[in-house]
Every structure is written in C-alpha cells, then in structure tokens.
Amino acid sequence: MYFKQLFDPKLAQYAYLIGCQATGEAIVIDPLRDIDQYYELAKEEGLTITAAADTHIHADYISGLRAFAEDGVKVYASDEGDADWKYEWLTNSDYPNRLVTDGDTFSIGNIGFEVVYTPGHTPESISFLVTDGAATDEPMGILTGDFVFVGDVGRPDLLETAAGQKGAMKPAAKTLYQSVDDFKKLPDYLQVWPAHGSGSACGKALGAVPESTVGYEVRFSPAFHAATSENEFVDFILDGQPEPPLYFGHMKKVNKEGPAVLASLPQPAKVSVAQLMKQDGEILDARDRHTFSEGHVPGSLLTTLDDNFNTIAGSYVDADRDIYLIIEEEKLEEAVRDLIRVGLDNIKGYCTPEELQGADIELEQTQSLTFADVEEERHRDDVQVLDVRKATEYASGHVPGSLNIAHTRLAAHLDDLPKDKELLVHCGSGQRASYATALLARHGFKVKWIDDLFSNWKERVKQ
C-alpha cells in the first residue's frame, strides 16, 4: 500500500494519494482543483490514478473532483444529507461516478474503503475507513475530512455564517454531537487523517500535527471533552468560532453546482505599467506590506504572496473581475495556482515590481501610525478607529469606541463604515490591517494604517 499526505500551507489543506502497489491503481481523496500535481506524483510512484473522492462539499477551496471526472477518472461523492446539499453537477451526468451512502464499500486494487456517514460540519459529510486488503481485513485508519481534526472537530456553523442558511447552526451542532458520540465507538488504534491542519478556518483550534488516532482524540481533544452532553457540546462548539472568510459561501455554491473545468492553468500576459494603469480590473500587489505602503499603484489591493494570499484575494475580489498581478516572474505560477484554487480564474496579466519601481508614474503611499499616535487622534470627531481582528480578540480587549469587522468579512460591510470620517485601521500586529487599509483606500475611504502591535496599546492602558 502506498500512502501520501499532501499539504497545502496556504489553505492548511490535506489531500491524500493512496495506491495499491500490486495493481498500480491509485485514488486521490479531497483533491485541489489543479490536479496535474497528483498525476505527476502518481507517475513518479509508478501508479495510475483511477479514482478520486471528496468527503464533503468544500467551502474553502474548489475541489478537483470535477476535473478528474472530466478526465474519465471515476469519482466518488456523498449522496447523504438533505436535498439542498447534493452534488448537482453529478446528478444525471455522464461522468463515471458513484454516489455513496453510509456503509457502502469500494476498492482500489487491494485497498478497501468503507463509507461512514459523519454529518454535522455539513449535512452530506462522509468519512472513509481504509483497509489494506493485502495484509488484513481490518481498517488501519479513517479519512475524516472536516469531521475530526487533530485537537478539534469541524465547525457546524458554516451553512449559516458563510452560506446564509438562517437557523442552521444549532441543529447542525446537535447532529455533530451525535457523530462525535458515534466516533468514540471506533477502535482506539485507528489512525485519523484529517482534511485540514492548523491555520484553517474550518475549525477554531486545529492542531499542527498532521495525523492522530481515535483514542488520542477521544482522550485529549477539547471538543470530545465537551461531548459529555448535547447541550454542553453545542455551547462549546458554537462559541468562539472565527468569522468565515467571505469567499466561503461562494465556494460552497460552486462545488455544489460544479466548478468550471480549466483546460490548463491561466497564462497571464506580461504588461507594462502604462498598460496596467489602463486596465479595468483588480490589481493585486503581491509584495510585502511595507514595500507596498511606500509606493503602489493607486487603487491596487495588497495581497502579499504568503500564507494569507488565497484568503485575502478570495475575500476581496469578485470572481467575475479581471485580475492583474504585480509579482516576480518566478512566483507567477504559484500565485496563479493559488487564485484558481479559490475560483479566481480571470488572471489576465502581470507586471514585475522592478518595472513598477522604474515607471514614470505617481505612486500612492499609505500613511502609517503607531498606537501612540492613535491615542492623540482617536478623540477627534472626524476619526473612527476600525479593529479588523476576530470578534473573540475584540471581546478580550479593544480601543474604546472602535468598530470591529474581521478583515476577511470587510468587503461585505463597506456600507456600514462612515465615509465622512478618517478610519484608523488596526489588528494585532499590523498585517491584517495592512490588507484592510488597501481595500478601504480602493473604495474611496480616508484611511490610515496602524503598523503596530496591539500589545503596545494594552501597555499604554496599564500606565
């Protein structure tokens, strides 16, 4: 048996390539949209991908399941849950597929898979028990998708907080409680292979360790400790969940209805600064925040090419908008892959930072402040402090009179902000605030960026 866990740090996402070395067949579980990476790895290992499967309808990235189906690879997807959450693109399709429910089994060579219905995070969520049939008839592990993570379980609120299905979160939390209770009955030795790790917004306390066991999670996970009663678990699991990035709702819809199939990665054209300035689209500047603040194209968005890139771009850019990048050529493909993974396909052109620095145009600067400056300015009638941290951070301490909107939800709340006041924008370190400041400037707000640690504000309060 061949087993490979594949990690994408920006989405904190795990996909799995599992193969039968006796027959040369392989399956990919929870693939990202750019499936060429899996074909390449399988080829290196002497395997042929004959199947692909999803554990649920994903909210944080576009699944590669349809791309595999388009290639003639047989796909497995859940047929559990209610009528509102089915894989619509597979219904009555000609794709080679099998819609599975609890207790169904299938095999890839000598490797056996049994479907376990594990709802709560989503209504259709399933897990897969994995058995190496060449060695035993007992499962060795379980692919839990977004049901059980290391140190956490999948959040049950996304249908309401991300997809807008009012009143869904509490019933989902109760359903999740039952799934957690059933999970406890599995053998302690079973390995747990989740679909996400630390950094994902699909839970509130995911661990950085890539795998666990059933016994370890039942014994040590705070979520399982809270599962002594339904009421205690529901209160625990719904409390303190981070605000979901704005693009999550769109991803759920796309993965349900069927993502567009890309023949190949977009190939953006190299453009001059003069051409860039004439385009009607979004300009994404992938440089670091301090370089951006010193001089950038007016109206451009700061989307530093780091672990926040997908989330910021997905939360700030409409999927139907044309996109132009300011980025080094050697990093272009990385950025393109990141963008298509969150459904941003219209990547038309790019310009290098070197060309921007040498161009004869007037660049815009971002005025920055420290928290010492904030104390002097915040009492003015024409000033409003905007805190773009999570609500849980805000609740633990904030600048008096400040507004709180999480940076990944900000684009949906622009109408809630005063246009007649100067916004002083801060977070915990200045990073999230730098993205938010650029977005606000893009939409015509008077804005200053607080490039400082919030701990410095707390220290000032103590004095």
Image (cartoon, helix red, strand yellow):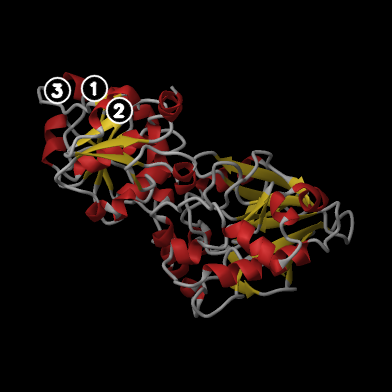
In which image quadrant can residue 136 be found? bottom right
Q: Which residue is mark 2?
A: 375
User: Of helix, strand and loop, which one carries label 2?
Assistant: helix
Which is more toward the observer, 400 or 43? 400
Specify which label sits upstream in the sequence, 1 or 2.
1
Which image quarter: residue 175? bottom right
Res. 117 visible in picture: no
Relative placement, left or right, of 304 versus 324 is: right
Q: Nearer the viewer, mark 3 or mark 2?
A: 2
Q: Which secondary structure, mark 3?
A: loop
Vertical position of residue 341 compared to residue 139: above or below: above
The x, y position of residue 163, in whole percent, is 43, 65
Circle 3 residue: 359
Image point (42%, 36%), residue name: 334
> At x 10% / y 25%, what residue is drawn?
361
Q: Residues within 10 Å of mark 2 (few under 14, many from 20)?
A: few
Residue 325 percent across, percent down from the top left: 28, 37
N-terminal-most mark, 1 or 3: 1
Q: How many marks?
A: 3
- Furthest-front residue in view? 463
Q: Nearer the viewer, mark 1 or mark 3?
A: 1
Would you name the residue on which mark 1 appears? 294
Q: Quadrant where the C terminus lies?
A: top left
Mark 1 burial class by Cα count in 10 Å: few <14, some 14-19, many 20+: few
Instruction: Please report whichever mark, 3 or 2, sits nearer to the chain's N-terminal start.
Output: 3
Mark pair 1, 3: CA separation: 15 Å
Residue type at mark 3 is Ala
